[in-house]
Image: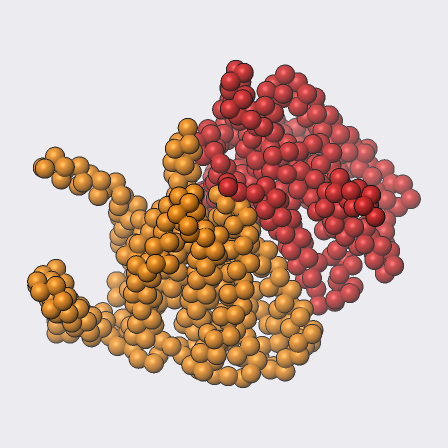
Amino acid sequence: MLKNKKFNFKEFFAENAVPVVFLTISAVFVYYSGTQPAIIMNDVVARFARNAFFVISLLIPVLAGMGLNFGIVVGAMAAQIGLYWALALKMEGIAAIAFAAVVCVPFAVLFGFLSGALNNKTKGQEMLTSMFVGYFAHGLYMLLFLFIIGGIIPIDVYEIILPNGVGARSSIDLTQVKGAVDSILKVDLFTFVLALAAIVAIIAVVNTVKAKKPDIAKFVVAVLLAGLGVAGNTMPAFLMFKRVVKIPVVTYGLIGLLCVFITAFFKTKMGQDMRAVGQNMEIAEVSGINVNKIRIIANIMSVVLSAWGQLLFLQNLGTLSTYTAHQNVGMFAGAALLIGGASVTKATVPQAILGTFLFHLLFNVSPLAGQNIFGSALIGEYFRVFIVYGVIALAIVLHAAKKAGGKK
Amino acid sequence: MTNVKKMIEDYGVSRFIVTCFAVLLLVAAFLQGQDMTILFSDILNRFGMYAFFSLAMVPSIISGTLLNFGITLGILAGVLAGLISLELGLTGFTGIGCALLLAIPFGAIVGFGYGLLLNRVKGSEMVVATYVGYAAVYIMCIGWMVLPFKNPSMIWAIGGEGLRTTITLDGYYDAILSNMLSITVGGVTIQVGMLLIIAFACLLMYLFTRSKMGIAMRAAGANPIYASAVGVNVNRQRIIGTVISTVLGALGIIIYAQAFGFYQLYTAPMNMSMYPVAAVLIGGASTRKIKISHVILGTLLYQTIIAVSVPVVSMLAPEGGLGDVVRIIVSNGIILYALAQAGGNK
């Protein structure tokens, strides 16, 4: 028994080596960046809100056995088409975002269907395929925004079209929609923590009533959160955090809902089928699951979710870089998920959340840390991009080595 | 009618479409009154710049490591070799000779390590290669910042850190191979020297694929189980194929740079592997099959499209950029088509 436990302990470290390493790097970088922790945290909170949706939406293709779906960039493109449409209709604020969120869905479904069908033709190479789907779609996207918009579809909104009337501006100011979702409700960090404590407490009570057994773990978490919230609101040591860090409640609420949805989805029949397909396509096929259909559905879901994610991203950022905003979406989301400890075949919601947090912490502090450690901010910037590609390369190598080893 | 259909199928559908497209572009350029001599000179120049990269796909495909997206690694090794030749202050044929000579061991060392890696990831070589290549580009970005190069024409003059983003070869060996034995026929510049070098390289590659080792490599790539049953060391063949491919990439970037006039550092090599990959696929290669003729025809067709589409399209749509868009759609579309044709594990 004891031996067994020791083994598990070792396994725990082996399985969580990646997040531990990145936590260490981040801690060192935070120290050397010489920035106020509260200021870093405020930035990370904003970046987290911007990006969590993508990372969580990547869980679906990963669990369906398609690896990191770099093709979610087509979702981001769908979102940008929707948002541009809203701007062309001179919509503003939350209405524009809501309109875009609705009209981007048919585009996202279509794109997801097409790329999913292509993925079915290239089983085993989905990550490569989805990457080229992204590049290919980027070409079509440029065709649409550089020539068709204005050239064929007339647009008469000065702010979003090039002066000669053909082609979208490469950088569009989103003042009208900036913070449309974020600023609905913003609270300081500790009020947010108190609210979280209350939610956890309610869940604990519900669980206790349901199971007729006290849900001690959740109660402890609730009490700890409450303690932190009270301490933060009263103790002067936390004053800086209370003043600086603002939480966009609605955005975080949406991210929370997505987590709940994903968890619940994988408990449904469809979700279980998806897992089965992800584990072994042949067995799934034999047991009567339409593998290709399930894979297409998984692809569509991740593309639609990432389209909504891109809208959250853009409303937070406040500018639309028409021709580049979508490009790195898949890559960054994939890297974040892996940094959280996921592999290309196995991932969980907590890994996605931890990974997003660590990834953006590292992204925030790298340049300044590079400046202070190596005497060059640029080295820090190169280093953080290296981390993105390096962690993806490593994860793919490990996965491929396992797959190749298993075949022998 | 069925005959025509059969002929198209024999020629290859994607190759047929691209050939038609290239011809159409040339006709359009002619009708627009573009200076055809400049266009043809440009096509030939570009062919010389990219032919070595495309040739590098041959050993990787026949040894079974598929399309070598990791040619980026060879490119980085070649750039390093080239920079050393500049740092030594060597000019003319000595300079480029030194760069090419250094590129061979550099490329071989990198290729060997890369080959070992590829042997561990059979079945996923292309995606591994892509991301290892990207990661290497950024490692070298840091490298270009910190490597102790001192030549003032390579580092930023004042206030900057590390090497310049583009390093001019003016005064070293700018266009030295491109201008070698270059003649002008009816206004079209034909780089005879360059074409001879490429022809020689293609001949060597052809002879290699017919040699004993080449045949063993082919066997290892086509059917690894059968090959190892008849005594071919499959892993060794794959490593040799990767080494040759990487060395060709390293030599290729030096030849590219002398024609272009600059070494491009930092993120420039990121997607350079897409050009030869798209080119050989257009030429009729697949992820598992390639001939020297695919290399030559593909590079010529692909570079024709790039060279001609920009001026043609910019005359049609003066807003600019459409030529580049066409290139992105065509090359990535071709790669996707090839991936779909190769099919997945059933």
**Which residue shows up at 42% across the image and 81% down it?**
A94
**Which residue shows up at 29% across the image and 65% down it?**
A260
Numbered circles on residues, count: 0
- State the residue in front, B19 or A16: B19
Quarter assignment of residue B120: top left
Chain B tint in image = red
> Residue B65 location, x and y as percent?
54, 33
Q: Which image quarter holds the C terminus of chain A?
A: top left
Tell me how the rendering is colored.
by chain
> Residue A120 location, x and y as percent?
52, 50
- State the residue in front, B54 or A289: A289
**Which residue shows up at 55% across the image and 58% down it?**
A114
Relative to A44, does residue B137 appear above or below in the rendering?
above
- State the residue in front, B112 or A348: A348
**Which residue shows up at 81% across the image and 50% down it?**
B23
Q: Can residue A188 be seen in this view?
A: yes
Relative to A42, does residue B331 appear above or below in the rendering?
above
Quarter assignment of residue A249: bottom left
Relative to B197, does residue B324 appear above or below in the rendering?
below
Left or right position of B100 against A371: right
Image chain in orange: A
- State the residue in front, B176 or B196: B196
Q: Which image quarter holds the N terminus of chain A?
A: top left
> Residue B174 location, x and y as percent?
70, 40
> Residue B128 location, x and y as percent?
47, 40
Q: Is residue B56 visible?
A: no
